Amino acid sequence: MEDIKDGSALHLQVKDAIIQLINNGEYKPNSQLPTEADFCEKFGVSRTTVRTALQQLTIDGFIFRKRGSGTFVSGNKVRQTLTTTVDHFSKQITMQGKKPLIKVINLDVLPADEFLSEQLKIKEGEPVNLLERIRFVNDEPIQFEMAYLPWYKTPALKRKGCEKSLYNQLESQFGLKISKTVESLELMMADDESAEKLKINKGDPCFLLETLAYLSDGSIIEYSRTIYRGDLTHFVIERNY
């Protein structure tokens, strides 16, 4: 049995002990962890204590759950850089020695509701392009994106071009060059849709990145919501002074 002592909360001690075992190589990346019952016996604590420790390890990205298979140690996280000079997704991933892939799963036109009309500064009911994509790293889904663009500025948006870079496609097809983006990042728990798209469990921790993209004239060309798997994503914020 591991040395679990009085002092800090038991679940934090269990969490730290598992992290140490991961760092020491006893539990290797992508290997399956023991069951909750095994950890209860190993550390001499209750199932509730173990479950709380595992939930925090999942949120912190040390482990992840596979539906119907168990709990596994996370491999190396994918680094995503947030900066004013950010490279495109494919370039960032390729530079890390990994294989990127972007799949367009839906490209449709729908009327703007009250929320989209406010975000895109258009009239309610005006047509909007909805672009849904999933980004993969080494064939593992890591991001689910829903992008909304005013149809009158982006008619007949080409699906194939969006499988590379949406912003490059906007410039090459419509002459629309992105001037700046304003992004908001927060934690969320996976809902039914994002869990299905990202092959995770409902309630698993994720990051939600909301983006407004502006043209040089100050008009908004895109509002998007991108959901990142918390177990596979590591954000780096770079500031240039």
Image (cartoon, grey):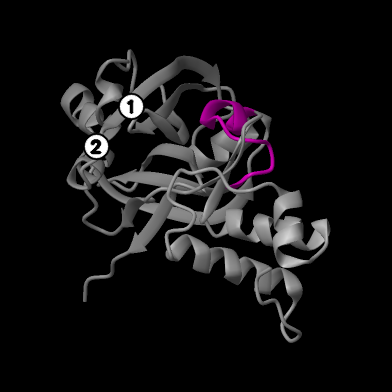
Type of amino acid under label 1 = Ile
Using the rendered view, name the quadrant where residue 182 is placed: bottom left
In the image, 86: left or right of 132? left
Q: In this view, does 38 lie to the left or right of 70?
A: right
Q: Residue furthest bottom?
A: 7
SS for dot 1: strand
Q: Which residue is drawn at 70% across and 57% down?
A: 39
Q: How far apart are marks 1 and 2 (CA)?
A: 8 Å
Residue 233: percent from left, percent from top: 43, 50
Could one spot residue 172 in this view of the protein? yes
Q: What is the residue that sits farthest to the front in this orientation?
A: 1
Number of the label disc, if any, that sits on residue 90:
2
Identity of the amino acid at label 2?
Ser
Which residue: 40% across, 55% down?
234
Which residue is under mark 1? 102
The question of residue 21 being in magenta is answered with no
For label 2, count other residues whose C-alpha is less than 10 Å away and answer few (under 14), some (14-19) or many (20+). Answer: some
Rendering coords of residue 219 (x, y %): 36, 43
Tell me which numbered mark, 1 or 2, is placed earlier along the sequence.
2
Determine the secondary structure under disc 2: helix
Q: Is residue 152 visible?
A: no
- Quadrant containing the C terminus is bottom left
* Magenta stretch in the rendered image: 193-205
Asked whether the residues under the numbered discs 1 and 2 touch, taking CB atoms below 8 Å apart as contact, a structural biologist would say yes
Which numbered disc covers residue 137? Answer: none
Number of disc labels: 2
Q: Where is 48 relative to 20, above or below?
A: above
Residue 109 x %, y %: 48, 15
| x 63%, y 66%: residue | 15
Task: Say which quadrant the N terminus sits in.
Answer: bottom right
Q: Which residue corresponds to the image point at 24% horizontal and 37% vertical from the top-left?
A: 90
| 211 to the left or right of 154 | right
